[in-house]
């Protein structure tokens, strides 16, 4: 697939042109930051920068070295993610989605390095979730959950890949306000997943137990349980953990969904966790709001028949809504145009 940009492939990202750095994530071995740039080639895009910062591990203490964050990062991130071979990233689509196209996955136009210690991802215009969203509304959570589950469904059932990094630091808000998944530095194919990898990832991220009041929401150790027959289980657990910590589970339209996430998707037994395609069928996602957002996000991939059905079925709803929001004549002409387009095609 083409990148649909003015041939930036021959241009490296200039670090001295980066502006507005926002720290997304940091540990003892690497840090991730988000920037815009004044470099003309990339000034319409955003830059995610990975900077490698090695530290020394105490190898004399065998009892602790196994869980040291620096060791985990060396194994899972620095030695793999920040490879000097940029071509490796361009070819390895499950690591860096340069060629990956999905409306719920942040589009990466280019991956390049300026040496051994840094990697730059040129991504679509967006902002980090963790930087600008503190108290998402119920509608935001509902639409965002559907979007992220759609991305996970694509990764799990189409690519056979576990993301392994589903957290607010890996979520970005696109120009259409859609939640998009990124942060593929810990991704692994299902066949390479193991309980040991999950243990290291959890240590790297420093996950701990969470409580709401006096009620324990989840035990961090439950995430460590893994069954290769249900290789999606860790992503589903992490997704549920993120959503449950973002919302008040005691009220609102997400109550039933959150109960499913707590009781099933964060269950100590991996086989009890519900796969993403089944979660997408939850009644909470059957509202007209979600179905309309999903259709518009995937509009270009819809068939003419699907477009015709959508506009004919929603004609009355669209017309009624637009009467209160736009000029009536403009509304009528707009809806008639879409219907006539579907009829002629």
Image (spheres, rainbow, N blue to C red):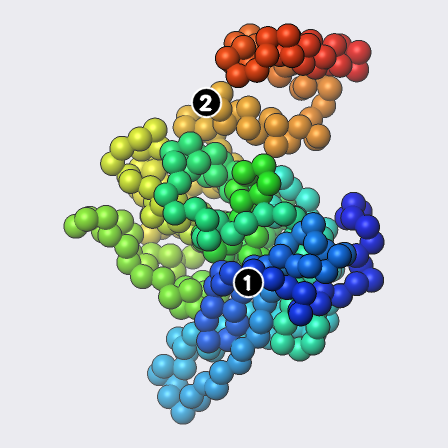
Q: In terms of sequence position, does the residue under pointer 2 or pointer 1 come before the other?
A: 1
Question: Which numbered disc covers residue 287?
Answer: 2
**How far across and how far down the image is residue 36, in percent?**
62, 57
Assign the C terminus to one quadrant of the image: top right
Disc 1 marks which residue?
21
- 300 to the left or right of 211: right
Placement of 260 over or under 214, stated as above or below = above
Taking depth in this image into account, of 88 and 28 the one nearest to the observer is 28
**How far across and how far down the image is residue 212, in percent?**
23, 48
Question: Which numbered disc covers residue 179?
Answer: none
Image quadrant assignment for residue 158: top right
Placement of 147 over or under 133, stated as above or below = above
Taking depth in this image into account, of 9 and 132 the one nearest to the observer is 132
Write the residue at 66% across / 28% down. 299
- The answer to whether any part of residue 38 appears in the image is yes
Q: Neighbour class for label 2 at 10 Å: few (<14), some, many (≥20)?
A: few
* Residue farthest to the bottom, as pictured: 60
Write the residue at 82% across / 50% down. 6
């Amino acid at each position: 697939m083409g990148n649909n940009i003015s041939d930036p492939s021959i241009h490296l990202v200039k670090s001295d042109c980066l502006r507005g750095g926002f720290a997304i994530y940091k540990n003892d071995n690497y840090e991730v930051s988000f920037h815009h740039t004044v470099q003309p080639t990339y000034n319409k895009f955003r830059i995610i920068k990975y900077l490698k910062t090695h530290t020394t591990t105490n190898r004399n203490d065998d009892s602790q070295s196994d869980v040291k964050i620096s060791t985990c990062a060396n194994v899972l991130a620095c030695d793999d993610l920040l490879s000097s071979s940029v071509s490796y990233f361009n070819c390895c689509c499950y690591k860096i989605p340069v060629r990956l196209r999905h409306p719920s996955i942040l589009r990466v136009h280019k991956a390049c390095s300026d040496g051994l210690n840094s990697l730059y991802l040129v991504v679509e215009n967006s902002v980090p979730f963790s930087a600008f969203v503190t108290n998402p509304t119920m509608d935001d959570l509902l639409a965002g959950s559907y979007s992220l589950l759609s991305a996970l469904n694509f990764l799990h059932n189409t690519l056979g890949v576990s993301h392994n990094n589903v957290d607010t630091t890996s979520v970005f808000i696109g120009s259409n306000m859609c939640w998009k998944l990124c942060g593929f530095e810990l991704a692994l194919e299902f066949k390479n997943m193991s309980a040991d990898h999950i243990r290291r990832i959890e240590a790297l991220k420093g996950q701990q137990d969470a409580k709401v009041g006096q009620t324990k929401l989840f035990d961090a150790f439950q995430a460590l349980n893994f069954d290769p027959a249900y290789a999606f289980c860790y992503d589903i657990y992490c997704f549920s953990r993120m959503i449950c910590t973002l919302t008040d589970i005691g009220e609102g339209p997400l109550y039933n969904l959150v109960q499913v996430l707590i009781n099933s998707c964060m269950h100590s037994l991996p086989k009890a966790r519900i796969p993403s395609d089944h979660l997408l069928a939850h009644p909470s996602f059957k509202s007209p709001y979600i179905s309309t957002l999903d259709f518009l996000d995937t509009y270009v991939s819809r068939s003419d028949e699907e477009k015709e059905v959508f506009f004919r079925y929603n004609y009355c709803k669209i017309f009624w809504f637009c009467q209160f929001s736009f000029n009536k004549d403009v509304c009528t002409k707009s809806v008639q145009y879409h219907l006539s387009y579907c009829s002629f095609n």
